[in-house]
């Protein structure tokens, strides 16, 4: 019997997603009818969704077994009162690989002092070697799939990585802490702070005036997680004071970042346009198809969102 899957992502992404999803469903042995609109919403078995797509009201989709998000973050949909179906967040290899590459690249950039050599080709010989990675402390906030992979990649390069999460986690090769005391211990004396927490009421402004005073003076903050994890005003002050040496930011409270925002012109801020971990249709389609196959086989779906926790 055919499974009816409604693609409710952005119209611009339908072109690449259609063949990617079709191939992924075939590889999982699924007989799927993939559509972008239906006459009777109650006949839909699964919804492939992004907040940029057309669906705001899930009430008519009474037969849907799950809503599968194309985005790793679900804060824009998790509070939708009409969404009574199970919500599955996007976790796929492409997202993880992209995040590891972005974070590792920017950590190494600041660790090695590459900006000084790239931007100062003025004929001055500067034979100053950086410390070894084993002498650098990294505070990693967030130990989900992305955070764990990032932490293990940096630990493999010999950085001293301490990971923190609100609830207790264990990640092979990493020191893992949790709770309020664990957050302070994780940040204290860190040379790098990497933010990969989900956005919840408890994580908003996790980096504020108090917590930004804990890392070593001149520490670097990298935020590829969620914009509201950082108190922007407190960050600007910490940059001016020299407590924070540089901030490399990929996510912001308002996106695109307004042209007049002070981050753009600040000499100690690097802005990247939310590209650290882009959902790639080929790998995202594989994750979606695998989860639908699990559901059709009577197995529990992976990465189902806990509504109470918000992720």
Image (tube, rainbow, N blue to C red):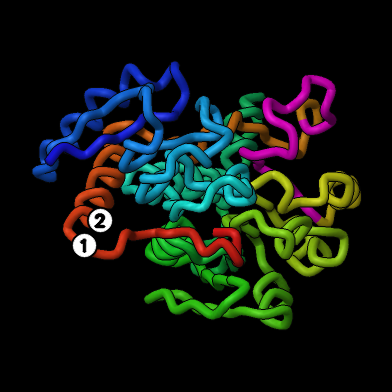
Examine the rendered structure and indicate whether residue 163 appears above or below residue 293: below
Q: Quadrant of residue 36?
A: top left
Evaluate whether residue 133 shows in this view.
Answer: no
| Residue lying at 62% horizontally and 43% vertically, measured from the top left | 76
Question: Is label 1 in a helix, a strand or a loop?
Answer: loop
Q: Classify mark 2: helix, strand or loop.
A: helix
In the rendered image, residue 249 lying in the magenta stretch gets the answer yes
Image marks 2 and 1: residues in contact by CB distance under 8 Å:
yes
Q: Residues within 10 Å of mark 2 (few under 14, many from 20)?
A: some
Q: Nearer the viewer, residue 177 or 139?
A: 177
Characterize the magenta stretch by its predominant secondary structure: loop
Q: Is residue 111 above or below residue 163?
A: above
* Side of 27 relative to 76 (left or right): left
Percent coordinates x, y for residue 65 in the rendering: 35, 50
Q: Quadrant of the C terminus?
A: bottom right
Tell me where the magenta segment starts and ends, as one range.
244-263
Q: Is residue 278 part of the magenta span, yes or no? A: no
Coordinates of residue 295 in the picture (x, y in percent)? 25, 56
Residue 158 horizontal/vertical position (percent): 43, 66
Residue 98 falls in which quadrant of the image?
Answer: top left
- Give the side of residue 35 with respect to residue 118, left or right: left
**Residue underneath mark 1:** 298
């Amino acid at each position: 019997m055919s499974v009816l899957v409604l693609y409710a992502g952005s119209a611009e992404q339908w072109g690449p997603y259609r063949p990617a999803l079709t191939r992924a469903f075939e590889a999982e042995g699924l007989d799927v009818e993939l559509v972008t609109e239906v006459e009777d919403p109650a006949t839909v078995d699964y919804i492939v969704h992004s907040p940029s797509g057309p669906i705001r009201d899930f009430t008519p989709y009474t037969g849907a077994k799950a809503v599968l998000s194309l985005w790793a973050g679900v804060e824009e949909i998790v509070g939708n009162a009409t969404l009574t179906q199970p919500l599955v967040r996007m976790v796929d290899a492409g997202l993880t690989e992209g995040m590891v590459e972005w974070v590792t690249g920017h950590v190494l950039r600041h660790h090695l002092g590459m900006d000084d050599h790239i931007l100062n080709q003025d004929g001055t010989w500067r034979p100053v070697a950086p410390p070894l990675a084993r002498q650098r402390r990294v505070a990693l906030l967030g130990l989900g799939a992305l955070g764990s992979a990032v932490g293990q990649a940096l630990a493999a390069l010999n950085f001293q990585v301490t990971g923190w999460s609100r609830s207790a986690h264990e990640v092979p090769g990493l020191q893992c802490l949790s709770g309020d005391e664990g957050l302070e211990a994780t940040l204290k004396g860190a040379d790098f702070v990497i933010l990969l927490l989900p956005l919840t009421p408890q994580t908003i402004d996790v980096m504020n005036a108090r917590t930004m005073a804990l890392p070593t003076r001149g520490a670097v903050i990298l935020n590829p997680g969620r914009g509201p994890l950082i108190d922007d005003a407190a960050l600007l002050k910490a940059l001016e004071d020299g407590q924070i040496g540089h901030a490399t930011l990929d996510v912001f409270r308002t996106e695109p970042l307004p042209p007049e925002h002070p981050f753009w012109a600040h000499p100690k801020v690097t802005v990247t346009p939310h590209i650290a971990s882009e959902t790639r249709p080929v790998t995202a389609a594989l994750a979606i198809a695998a989860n639908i196959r699990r559901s059709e086989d009577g197995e529990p779906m992976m990465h189902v969102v806990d509504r109470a926790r918000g992720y």
